[in-house]
Image: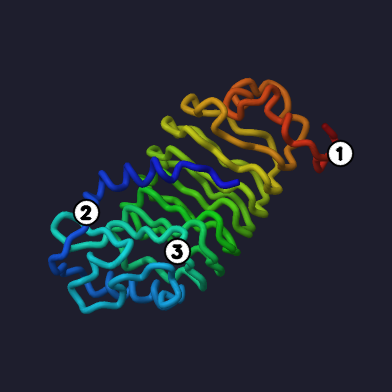
Amino acid sequence: MTFHFRARACVVVAAIVSAFSCAANAVIPTTERDALIALYTNTNGASWTTHTGWNGAAGTECTWFGITCNATLSHVTEISLASNQLTGTIPSLTGLTNLAGFSAYNNQLTGTIPSLTSLTNLFNFDVGSNQLTGTIPSLTGLTNLGYFDVGSNQLTGTVPSLTGLTNLIGFSTDNNQLTGTIPDLTGLAVLGYLKVGANHLSGVLPAATNGLVPGGSSLCPNDFPESSYTDAPAWDAATGFTPWYTPCNLIFANGFEF
């Protein structure tokens, strides 16, 4: 099950990007308009549950369903298309350099997650509960990132480095096919929720951060070795289970059974 920090993230993003509906014409860069049209085309916009205004004349983009612009109507700051019957693939988002929020969870998206490295204003990224494949892109340099959810997809590869993401509050990669280890959590002082269960992760658990909300994180099932089972009271608290591996209920890679 993917992590439910979406409602909170939407409220925070709305405050950051001054979300409102505006009928006045906006003058956004051509690169941003092109990125929106590519999103509509790639995800079969004509078949969305709601697509009011999309592909309208230049200057109307800030009135399109699910689109929020900044106060001066000069840049797209949020795309919110969750549970809207999107199919197909997510195109490049590179042109949306002012984007703070991208929400397309609970659709039928396939293909890979595009590069996010140019989206340095990104605060919330949520594409959980789709059918995405491939690896999780690098998050390096996204220092404004607060919430990241790619849970309940078909992703492979490793959990990316979280180093430097000092504003990260919620992180979910659960219910995928990820391997490797949980990355170092040092410096993530405001991290409250870590959801990495139901993958194929291994290795010793990193030290838990002080900000993890009791009962808000998940680690099981995965393939952690026995060495991870000792001296982990912080993870007991974070997962709400003592010991934390109580809900695993499977045979781990090393043959240790609970």
Q: Quadrant of residue 34?
A: bottom left
The residue at the far front in this view is: 49
Q: Nearer the viewer, residue 158 or 90?
A: 90
Q: Nearer the viewer, mark 1 or mark 2?
A: 2
Q: Residue at x 60, y 33 (%)?
A: 206
The residues tagged by marks 1 and 2 sit, at their Cα atoms, a distance apart of: 55 Å
Q: Secondary structure at mark 2?
A: loop
Report the residue marked by disc 2.
20
- What colour scheme does the image use? rainbow
The residues tagged by marks 1 and 3 sit, at their Cα atoms, a distance apart of: 43 Å
- Sort mark 2 into few (<14), some (14-19) or many (20+) by Cα contacts within 10 Å: some
- Sort mark 1 into few (<14), some (14-19) or many (20+) by Cα contacts within 10 Å: few
Report the amino acid beneath label 1.
Gly
Lower position in the chain sequence, tag 3 or tag 2: 2
Q: Nearer the viewer, residue 213 or 105?
A: 105
Relative side of 109 to 248, left or right: left
Residue 75 in the image, given as x and y percentages of width and height: 22, 62
Determine whether 161 is above or below 157 in the image.
Answer: above
The residues tagged by marks 3 and 2 sit, at their Cα atoms, a distance apart of: 20 Å
Q: Quadrant of the C terminus?
A: top right
Q: Residue at x 51, y 73 (%)?
A: 88
Report the residue marked by disc 3.
84
Q: Secondary structure at mark 3?
A: loop
The numbered dot on residue 12 is: none
The numbered dot on residue 255 is: 1
Report the amino acid beneath label 2.
Phe
Residue 148 in the image, given as x and y percentages of width and height: 46, 48
Q: Quadrant of residue 22?
A: bottom left
Residue 53 in the image, given as x and y percentages of width and height: 28, 72
Determine whether 257 is above or below 114 in the image.
Answer: above
Q: Residue at x 35, y 52 (%)?
A: 122
